[in-house]
Image: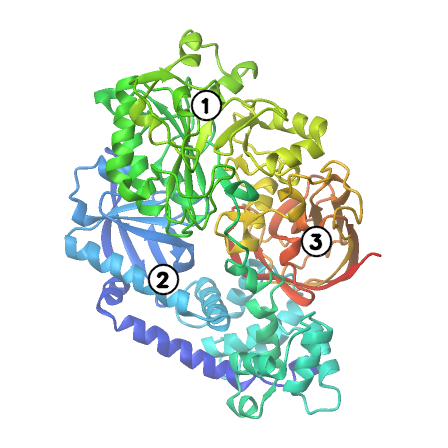
Amino acid sequence: MSSSLSTRASPSGGARTKEAAASRARLAADADVAVMLNGSDLCKIKSRSWKKQRRFQLQADCFTVQYESRKASKNKSTFSMDDIEAVREGHQSKVLESSSVAPERCFTIVFRGRRSNLDLAAETAAGAQHWMSGLGKLMANMDRMGPQERHDTWIYEWFKKADKNKDERMHLKEVKNLLLMMNIQMNEHHAERLFKWADRSCSRTLEYDEFVEFYQALTQREEVRFLFRRLCQDTKNVLSASKLTTFLQDCQGELDSTEERSTFLINKHEPCEIVREQGCMTFDGFLLYLTSTDGSVFNPTHGSIHQSMREPLSHYFISSSHNTYLLQDQLRGPSSTEAYIKAFLKGCRCVELDCWDGPNEEPVIYHGYTLTSKILFRDVIQIVEKYAFKVSEYPVILSIENHCSLEQQRVMAHHMKSILKNKLLTEPVESGESKAPSPEQLKGKVLIKGKKLKRMQQPAGDVGFRAAQNGEVGEVSDEDEAAEMEDEDVRCKVKSHDTERHQNLAKELSDCIVYCCSVHFPGLGSPRHPWETSSLSEGKALKLLKDGGTELVRHNSQFMMRVYPAARRTDSSNFDPTPYWSAGYQIVALNFQTPGEEMDLYEGWWKQNGSCGLVLKPMFLRSPTSRFTPAEPQPHGYGLRSVRLKVKVISGQQLPKVANSSKGAIVDPLVRVEIHGVPTDNARLETKYIANNGFNPQWNESLSFVVTVPELALVRFVVEDHDTASRNDFVAQYTLPFSSLCRGYRHVHLLSQDGTSVAPSSLFVYIHITNIE
């Protein structure tokens, strides 16, 4: 027997198994959870005519729900508590709203990522309450779990998946199938040897406790053990608080760490009570620390708001969604209020509403002149009222593209005032007439971005926004996305175009607009007011960046600018947002429904300030006298300091399989590290690939980069499945701002293509950053 298998799993492993079983027993004793464990017949509703009865049942792990599928090739479907984003009661989806089922029997399960929601109806109102309450309790239980508990739950889930005959034991054949499912290519002899070692009962099967030992032997982290032994030096396999402090300061870049900090980490992560009381840490505790948020590559202090929120609004980047109502493409895709909910829950602070006349004097939202479906303006405003401030308390901008008649514009104004009430900003705040207010001053407020009556754009009084208006209607400003798109050759020519460009605007709607008055871009250097906002398509904005340079940066330090995707992107593809941020454009709007590299960068960017949807620009983008040139920034100019970034990619852990891959396929993983920022900083380097090992690949390769403007840079870790005959397949990624990068030995907790967690998949890396003189 090799030394790696000569000892049994640590006592803490068995104890954790018992704790997990006790936790499941406590959950199972709950009345609502008990109903779910027994199973219920729920009606799955997909449309007014498609309703099918299905059996839904919570599994013994109190983590997974299994239900019958209509697909002949797949008898059962499952989802886990981690897959669920929210559970909504009653008729909170269009499908259920149009059904004849009583709302008290209905509920919607909303999933993370791109998975379709489940609209369900129970046989009774009490049955629906049991499921809604039970799901809420199980999700809350998951939220309370620490990293180790989540990992133990993950192991148990694999055990249940592999136990095909449901006898609570795993035969050797089931174990071999499990290895394939877990992305492990292991020779048959070694698999059998490991199986026999773990089979303490000599029953030729593995019970759950034995399977835990099998798994622990399989996942030994020798690269971390080597590091731990080096740190311990002459001590007896424990790390003292003083040596942990030295490690935090010298290796992890936490220069202000003290022994008090080390003691806190020991108490938090060390599983052995005796060692913990001695103020020391075992290897198990050290590994738990490294795999927790404390050992993450992402700076945990950036997980909450830490930037000043008292600067003028023009000094911030603002998370913004384009054509927010769309779930798919721009020509035929469905529109849904759900898209607004998802955007708000991602911290989005600027959403778009394309408004058109609808039946029964009710305005609708859809992509005009296309076959996209329509949703009611009123319904969207109700979503804004309910969800706009669930994730972030900072202001939300409703970017309105108005194509409605005067009558329906008045209906729009009525809905906004009656539904949003005091959340709708209708009066300016005291910020002075030379600058816009700050996010702090606008907390909890909804701002309307749209066209405003010209006679109301002249400043008056202290704040420069109050003006008298006697007329009922007036001509709107010549600016909106439809007008910008007229030369894009994608939309059909509209016969009423001339009328639209000189459309009348109702005073009631104009009165709702205070700070974000939409105006046609007057050009750099032209007189402007700080409460005006201009929109440009990506192409025009990029041309302005190349032609304007420093002058554009100075302009954007004072005035609001919005950039949106070109009309040719009918497939809802996205552009790279980083060049626009480097020029100080505040509102860079992307199609949130489309995953990919661009959205990875976009979602990664907002992490640096608590994911609140607002990021303070660097000083060189806020100064009206800035000399910063985004296309060709000068190293060490205007306060810039170049750095050298070295990333040692050490190993990977439990990498996910490629989506839709064959059952026996094992990935050949490689890691690519990318820098995205100003043009001179953009770079990509990758490791070699490791054949047939997605479970615990070892690379030990160093990649080096020079970063000229770290304040504008993002770092993206990408795992791909190498393929010699075709393009590599995407496996997972993680993107974060350079400013949020932690030094030292860190774990990169990977995400799927749609940005959801694929825990416990991770990369183990070493980060070294030095200044370049």
Query: Helix, strand or loop at disc 3?
Result: strand
Task: Confirm whether residue 213 shows in the render.
Answer: yes
Q: Give the left or right position of residue 335, taking residue 222 as reference.
A: left
User: Which residue, given by chain and number where applicable, does mark 3 sit on?
Assistant: 671
217 or 136, nearer to the observer: 136
Q: Give the left or right position of residue 480, taking residue 487 as reference.
A: left
The amino acid at mark 3 is Val
The residue located at (62%, 83%) in the rendering is 259
Q: Is residue 691 above or below residue 150?
A: above
Looking at the image, is mark 3 or mark 1 earlier in the sequence?
1
Residue 74, percent across and down? 40, 47
The amino acid at mark 1 is Leu
Q: Is residue 554 above or below residue 1?
A: above
Estimate the spatial distance between the alpha carbons at disc 3 and disc 2, rounded to whole Å: 33 Å
Estimate the spatial distance between the alpha carbons at disc 2 and disc 1, rounded to whole Å: 37 Å
User: Which residue, given by chain and number where applicable, does mark 2 sit on?
Assistant: 139
Query: Helix, strand or loop at disc 2?
Result: helix
Task: Confirm whether residue 374 shows in the render.
Answer: no
The residue located at (36%, 35%) in the rendering is 336
The label on residue 664 is none
559 or 464, nearer to the observer: 464
User: Which residue, given by chain and number where applicable, does mark 1 sit on?
Assistant: 331
Looking at the rendering, in which quadrant would you find the C terminus?
Answer: bottom right
| Label 3 neighbour load within 10 Å: few <14, some 14-19, many 20+ | many
The amino acid at mark 2 is Met
